[in-house]
Amino acid sequence: MIINIIIMVNTKVGEKMADIKYLLDKSKETIQEEGVVGFIKKTGRYVTGHKNLVKNVNCYKDVLFINGCTLPHPTRYRVDHQMEQLLANGYTTDTIFYEDLTLEQEKYYKTFVFFRCPITETIEKFITLAKKQNKVVFYDIDDLVFDKEYTKTIKHLKTLNKDELDLYYDGVKRMGQTLKLCDYAITTTPTLANELRKYVKDVFINRNVASEKMTELSIRAIKNINKDNSKVIIGYLSGSITHNADFELILPVIEKIMEKYNNVYLKVVGLLDIPKELQRFSDRILTAPFVSWKKLPEIIASIDINLAPLEDSIFNEAKSENKWIEAALCKIPTVASNIGAFKEMIQNKQDGFLCSNEEEWFQVLEELVVSLDLRNSIGTNAYNRVTKNNVTTYTGYSLTKFISSKLPKTIAFVLPTTNISGGVNVILKHCSILKNVGMNVFIINSDKVNDNIINNDGEIEVISNVTSKIDAKIDVMVASLWATLDYVKKYPKVLEKAYLVQNFETDFMKYGDYGKIIANSTYSYDDIKYITISKWCQNWLENKYERKVSFIRNGINLNQFPYKERKFNKKIKILVEGNSDDYYKNVDESFKIVEKLDKSKYEIQFLSYQGKPKNWYYVDKFMHRVPYDQVGKVYQDADILIKSSILESFSYPPLEMMATGGVCVVVPNDGNIEYLKDEENCLFYEKGNIDQAVQQIERLSNDKKLRDHLIKEGIKTAKSRNWKEIEKEIVEVYVGNK
């Protein structure tokens, strides 16, 4: 992994090959010192620092952690460590401070975890946007700090002035507001989980654990420590000032122990105020400031007994077992209050001690003070248990499984371009239908266009694989053209690989074009699920290539192509549709037909998404790249559609024209004869027979009875293809029986 990342960065920023060794050495050093997550962060900063050379590089990943906490330790436990857990189980992650969050980041992740995030206008909009895309949002919190009802039990708050208290409670209120917007929660203890269930649908308990790096630093600290066994050092790592009240719980016991045993020292680390009762032991009281987590193992390894007293309150019931875990990693026994997480995790007298009153505290501490063997045995037992059960690498599967179980299926369609065409419109409709049933759907665009597609059905997110990397687990990835199948086949993190075949693309290219061979090869893979939207495609895939094929009927949104009565009593409007650059669209033939029409009787309109009119085309009105939601008006404004395509998978324009009440003159091909019937809902003409086509147009212009019949049957055909009738087929093919 190191090599892949560095070479990727190295390649992108144009470094010389001689520099790779240096980068690899630095990477290994970073992993040893700061762990995998630290390495990933530094790699990100390296790329950012070279943004003059690496521009607009995004990455679609599984999870984004939004950190709302300014304190380093909670962030480490609940963001960095959970990222490491997910990474060890195949999930890609990022983190960002909540004030740096932007709405644009929403489309680059499958799901989001908000850790201790107070509500902001951006966060509220962000969550709303995520849910519109069927993305699940989690809230993570490790303390009862989301409701004033819980925090009022914290004694330290009584020392704050009114302004400080108001500010604190405002933060608590705002965290609660974000929590209520989320779907699920992740937390550290059963007590917290029980309270959180009042706010969200489900809660997962992911207990705090140690990182790989913390474990390595602890092992190193054990090896490097040289203790004076004539001294017994009792350690109290207070952390924050809120723990003053907890220490007071055992103050009489500590005073009694230090009075009885002259070799007992007290080491206080952090913000604890040394009580006056202990001042007479000042020569045996050691203090150390609040230290970084990287230095903490050295401190812990230097003591002999770890203290973890907690007052009995609902707030403390929710506290985690961090102190026990971190002491255990250094083989130091912990004596803890018999409440909450300590009660749940410590096996009393095996890998730690639980105490319920002063008498028990004194008895246990005395036993540990006088027995080095007891300290060693309990510490070793704790170490053996914690290194296997309470480290990131060994504990992340359940978290990954929980998050995964709450996510909808992620379905990605790979397109060569998002420029509007009939085939693209079909895919967009499939996307919208899948999105409407709750799936997370997006488009991977093979050109640089990164803009989301917005139409009458809503918004579909688009990510360019030219300017972005895709690095998330995807349930279904669908190729949409022969040139996109290679991307799908090579993508490693996809459960099901599919190919939506909308045409026999081999015929798109002329003889001698090597692409013709490659296109044809895409119909012969055993590990691809083939899907098609036309019966003729299904037949040749099954008969010629022996593929198993899932068939989905093509449909039409009738609301987008409403009926409009045509009078045919003025200048008759002829519409030609198609790309003039593609030979198989045969647009030239349409304009050869136009050449023979009486221009005083007919107005010629041309609609195209790609090619423009050639010099010799006679065109009264040219419409280029009309937004799809406005195409219905184009058809409504025309009376007769000429469609000369010789190769179509399905051919939408005649169906769309018929839906609006217009009539069609078409060349029959494999794609359109699925629904077009000559003299029933349209008029056919033989390819190349210009005179026959002109004759058919004249018939339509002059024969009202014929027109009325074709219009009536055309509308009936369009109604039979209403998307509403096809939605179930689409969901079953892509998702299965939901």
Image: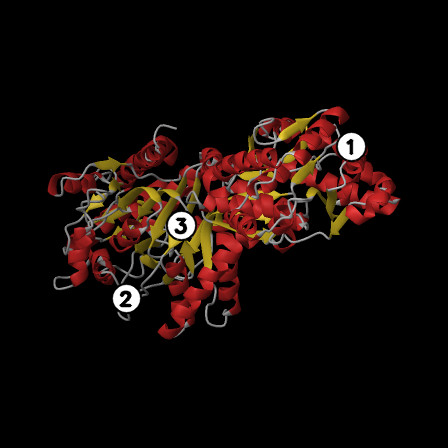
Q: Which residue is mark 2?
A: 617
- Residue at (25% x, 44% y) in the render: 650
Quadrant including the N terminus: bottom left
Residue 724 on image: x %, y %: 39, 33
Label 3 to label 2: alpha-carbon separation: 36 Å
The tag on residue 253 is 1
Q: Earlier in the sequence, mark 3 or mark 1?
A: 1
Dot 2, how many residues are within 10 Å of its Cα: few (below 14), some (14-19), or many (20+)?
Answer: some
Q: Earlier in the sequence, mark 3 or mark 2?
A: 3
Residue 531 on image: x %, y %: 26, 40
- Residue type at numbered disc 2: Tyr
Q: Earlier in the sequence, mark 1 or mark 2?
A: 1
State yes or no: discs 1 and 2 in contact (Cβ < 8 Å): no
Between disc 3 and disc 1, the foreground one is: 1
The tag on residue 443 is 3
Disc 3 is placed on an element classified as: strand
Q: Residue furthest front?
A: 230
